[in-house]
């Protein structure tokens, strides 16, 4: 078939773990957007979801740190975190190993992908999935981008990854969704945790929704670190999706700065017209 749905959604452990501590109005607006995104995903009758995210040293550390890594496992366990911390039960998430292998085979014509047949999900994958696939019944193909530790994946290579994924997805007979999941601005695990740069987030989202490649790729790593925090480096997941739908924009469904969630919270639906 082809790519049937694309977009981006935020992740942070507080989004689910500190649900009851958030201002009710902001939380409700954000959760409602996440549920709308879930319904839109399922309306496309997807066979699988390629979820591009950034995990946090749960599987990949300094001894082995792939720039890009795609999951080829039969299934995945998660969350790594405790149920009490994340408010998400331990579960098994189905993979799509044969489809993932076919996607990797095509994408690797243009980008270099690491791959793994063994992978446990942390909140980087589990928080979006808790909203999007609450019954854990949609096969997931995880793709991790090193957004955590230098040398980070270059922004233009993330964009190229998105273009390669699009070509690979469109070459398959299945109906496939592609969602990027990460920060926008946040300062996790630092004394500034809870800080959000709403002005920076809205400027980035304006360029993302308009899918202005030059604008999205103009940031240096130092600028992102200064203005959007270490967690802001996860915009690489959004930029990958922008590459996959290059030439097409999208619609901002929600942005809420929610300090107790410790991240700028967004949902963006992108146009997947070929
Ligand atoms: Fe993260």
Image (spheres, rainbow, N blue to C red):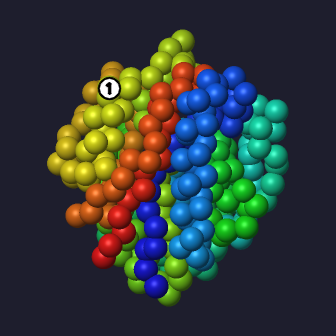
Residue 151, horizontal then vertical, whole percent: 38, 39
Crowd band around label 1 with a 10 angstrom C-alpha radius: few (<14), some (14–19), many (20+): few
Q: Is residue 113 left or right of residue 72?
A: left
Q: Position of residue 223 (x, y in %)?
A: 28, 27
Q: Quadrant of residue 272?
A: bottom left
Quadrant (top left/top right/bottom left/bottom right) for the C terminus? bottom left
* Residue in the picture at 56% in, 30% down: 26
- Secondary structure of the residue carrying tag 1 is helix
Pick out the residue farthest to the left: 214
Tell me if residue 35 comes above or below residue 122 in the rendering.
Answer: below
Residue 137 is at least partly visible in this image? yes
Q: Is 249 in front, or is 228?
A: 249
Residue at screen point 74% across, 61% down = 136
Going by the picture, which residue comes out furthest to the front?
Answer: 25
Give the farthest residue toward the bottom: 173
Residue indicated by mark 1: 199
| Nearest to the observer: residue 67 or residue 169 | 169
Q: How many marks?
A: 1
271 vs 104, left or right, is: left
Is residue 71 at least partly visible in the picture?
no
Q: Is residue 266 left or right of residue 212?
A: right
Residue 128: % across, % down: 60, 49
- Seen in the picture, residue 202 relative to 254 is either above or below; the reply is above
- 137 with respect to 243 (left or right): right
Q: Does 73 sit above or below residue 180?
A: below
Front residue of 42 and 118: 42
């Amino acid at each position: 078939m082809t790519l049937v749905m694309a977009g981006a959604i935020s992740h942070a452990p507080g989004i689910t773990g500190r649900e009851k501590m958030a201002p009710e109005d902001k939380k409700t607006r954000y959760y409602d957007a996440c549920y709308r995104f879930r319904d839109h995903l399922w309306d496309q009758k997807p066979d699988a979801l390629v979820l591009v995210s950034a995990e946090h040293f749960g599987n990949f550390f300094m001894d082995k740190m792939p720039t890009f890594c795609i999951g080829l496992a039969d299934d995945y366990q998660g969350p790594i975190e405790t149920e009490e911390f994340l408010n998400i039960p331990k579960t098994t998430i189905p993979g799509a190993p044969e489809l993932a292998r076919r996607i990797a085979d095509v994408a690797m014509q243009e980008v270099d992908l690491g791959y793994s047949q063994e992978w446990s999900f942390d909140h980087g994958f589990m928080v979006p999935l808790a909203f999007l696939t609450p019954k854990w019944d949609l096969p997931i193909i995880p793709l991790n981008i090193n957004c955590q530790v230098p040398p980070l994946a270059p922004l233009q290579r993330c964009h190229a990854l998105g273009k390669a994924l699009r070509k690979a997805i469109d070459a398959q007979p299945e109906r496939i969704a592609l969602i990027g999941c990460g920060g926008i601005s946040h300062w996790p695990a630092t004394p500034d945790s809870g800080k959000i740069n709403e002005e920076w987030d809205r400027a980035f989202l304006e360029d993302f929704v308009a899918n202005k490649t030059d604008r999205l790729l103009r940031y240096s790593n130092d600028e992102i670190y200064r203005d959007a925090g270490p967690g802001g480096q996860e915009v690489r997941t959004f930029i990958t999706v922008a590459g996959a739908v290059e030439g097409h924009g999208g619609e901002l469904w929600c942005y809420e700065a929610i300090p107790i969630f410790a991240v700028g919270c967004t949902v963006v639906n992108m146009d997947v017209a070929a």
